[in-house]
Image (cartoon, rainbow, N blue to C red):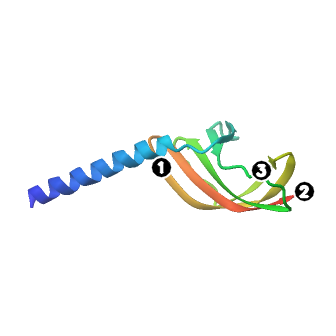
Amino acid sequence: MKKLFTILFSFVLVLSLSFTVHAEQELLPLIASGYTEDGIYYEIRGEISLSRSNSQFVSREVTYEGKVSPPRQTFWRESISGTAYTGTLTLVYSRYINNKTIAIYEGTLTAQ
């Protein structure tokens, strides 16, 4: 039983280390950074579409320093290819790792 536990623990450890390295190598482009009203540093990353249309589906990764509870929905305003877009994004994933909270938001933004 002890040998099985050691093998299982080693597998989980290797898997978690490879995930961390893989995640750090594939950072999305930085869109913006700043501080929340509470003074918590954050970064926003995501792909930016170069095509112009009345609406854009976006996925944005927001990384907060420390352990925070990200809001379930957030009003979003962003300039894409020189056009202002707004809309509400919904939290689809969040995780606390290495003293950072990573939140993924998705939704459709509409041109203003």
SS for tag 1?
A: strand
Q: Residue at 87% across / 58% down in the picture?
A: 111
Measuring from the top left, give residue 61's x and y in whole percent: 61, 50
Whether pointer 3 and pointer 1 mark residues with C-beta atoms closer than 8 Å, the reply is: no
Res 30 quadrant in image? top right
* 67 is higher (above) or lower (below) than 76: above
Estimate how packed mark 3 is, as few (under 14), some (14 to 19) or many (20 or more) residues with alpha carbons within 10 Å. few
Measuring from the top left, give residue 41's x and y in whole percent: 62, 37
Res 34 quadrant in image? top right
The numbered disc on residue 112 is: 2
Q: Residue at 82% across / 47% down in the picture?
A: 81
The numbered disc on residue 50 is: 3
Whole-number angstrom distance, CA of label 2 to CA of label 1:
34 Å
> Which residue type carries mark 1?
Tyr
Upstream in sequence: badge 3 or badge 1: 3
Q: Residue at 49% across / 53% down in the picture?
A: 95
Upstream in sequence: badge 2 or badge 3: 3
> Which residue type carries mark 3?
Leu
Estimate how packed mark 2 is, as few (under 14), some (14 to 19) or many (20 or more) residues with alpha carbons within 10 Å. few
* 20 is higher (above) or lower (below) than 8: above
Nearest the eye: 105 or 67: 105
